[in-house]
Amino acid sequence: LVKANSERGRLSFTTDLGEGVDGAEAVFIAVGTPTRAEDGHADLTYVFAAVRELAKVLKGPTVVVTKSTVPVGTGDQIAALLEKEGAPAGMSVASNPEFLREGAAIRDFKIPDRIVVGAEDDKAREVLREIYRPLFLNQAPILMTGRRTSELIKYAANAFLAMKISFINEMANLCEAVDADVHDVARGIGLDNRIGPKFLHPGPGYGGSCFPKDTLALLHTAADVGVEQRIVKTVVEVNDDRKNSMADRVAKALGGSVQGKRIAILGLAFKQNTDDMRDAPSIPLVNSLLKQGAIISAYDPVATDNARGLMEGAEFAKDAYAAAKDADALVVVTEWDEFRGLDLERFAQAMSGKLIVDLRNVYNRADAEEAGFSYIGLGRGKIDR
Ligand code: UGA
């Protein structure tokens, strides 16, 4: 996309801000808003720095749009800052949150479930409607709302999705105790349109640069205005516990101790189709296993380089079979498609132990047992405890 559109003269790049925004009807701010280390709030340093620079170079009325995930009220602060820093009169500030997933961003952009625009004036609404017209023609619903509401929609969406994941993870724990199958539970409830089938896949806890950061930021926004958010607070706690309990699950499967055991880790990225290690569940898992005396041999199709500095003492293998060589157990941490088709018999031959702990349920028990493994998945009956 970048190549084709650059060649056709529709896309260009510059490090000169004035040149970049010259004649623009809309300017999107899409900088990062990481968690502020001191207090867990969203760090708006980069947003405000961009606004200050913009104020100096904009020549006429422009729609300034925040694509960055920003707490409620940031649009108001941006409007005030533009004025303070001497931007031309007649500026509009709008919110246009993004709902793209890493690894599926282009598809999500082209076929969005909805487009949300938060604006306080007609000009901003018109310009954004025009920008999104091609998607709108494809019947993507566009929701026009107030700026603050739009800012909150982003956080509410991510918190709700995080809640679905924590819900199914707790349900998986219950399934293990009562001998039920969590995938059938997910399907059984997900077929109800009011619930929906997505984001009900159990795992080692959600990670990435969005859910952990945005749930925390939402809690801070709520605390600032004195409004309790007990559900989101619990979601965060459930997820932290989930991530931190995965090492014990592996230890238990290995008879209580991992001391001196060689453990193969399949997948390090926080999810498939990305090399992103931010808040990946693999980090607490591997570090805890290393601390308990395990020898770790890990493989990820693309995230290894990013993982190196985050798990000191781990070995990194060039492929899944090399990681499994002489291992006592194989632990699946990321649901890469390439893991689904691996040859379990070959693993069985390469390994010294015959145990698979599958934290993404990519294999099924019958296949694993046929290859001679003991198999422990998530929420698939009593035996998974
Ligand atoms: C998430 C949202 O899905 C996007 O809509 C949003 O735009 C984005 O955050 C953002 O705020 O920028 P992303 O972080 O790329 O996207 O990844 P997800 O696909 O949502 O997965 C997040 C985590 O939840 C991963 O660790 C994944 O493994 C886990 N997950 C997801 C589950 O454990 N179970 C599920 O059923 C779904």
Image (cartoon, rainbow, N blue to C red):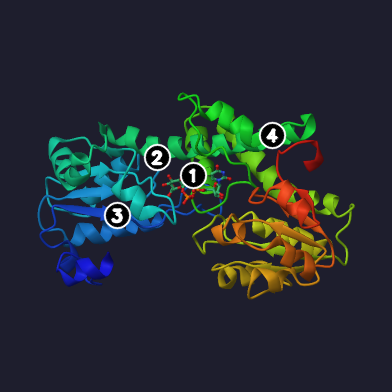
Image height check: is 113 above or below 85?
above
Quick one: SS at disc 4? loop
Three-letter amino acid code at disc 2?
Answer: Lys
Which mark sits nearer the N-terminus, 2 or 1? 2
Three-letter amino acid code at disc 3?
Answer: Ile
Front of the two marks 2 and 3: 2
Is disc 3's CB within 8 Å of ligand 1? no
Three-letter amino acid code at disc 4?
Answer: Asp
The residue under label 2 is: 154
Measured as percent of width and height from the top left, residue 343 is found at 67, 63
Is disc 2's CB within 8 Å of ligand 1? yes
Give me the C-alpha separation between circle 2 and circle 1. 9 Å
User: Hey, which quadrant is residue 37 in on the image?
Assistant: bottom right
Front of the two marks 3 and 4: 4
Q: Are marks 2 and 1 in contact (CB under 8 Å)?
A: yes
Give me the C-alpha separation between circle 1 and circle 3. 18 Å
Q: Are marks 1 and 3 in contact (CB under 8 Å)?
A: no
The residue under label 4 is: 181
Q: Are marks 4 and 2 in contact (CB under 8 Å)?
A: no
Is disc 1's CB within 8 Å of ligand 1? yes
Quadrant for the N terminus in the image: bottom left
Which residue is pictured at 52% across the width and 61% down the height?
Answer: 276
Count residues near mark 2 (Cα–Cα under 10 Å), then give few for <14, some for 14-19, many for 20+.
Answer: many
Quick one: SS at disc 2? helix
Which mark sits nearer the N-terminus, 1 or 3? 3
Which residue is pictured at 82% across the width and 59% down the height?
Answer: 354
The residue under label 1 is: 214
Quick one: SS at disc 1? helix
The residue under label 3 is: 29
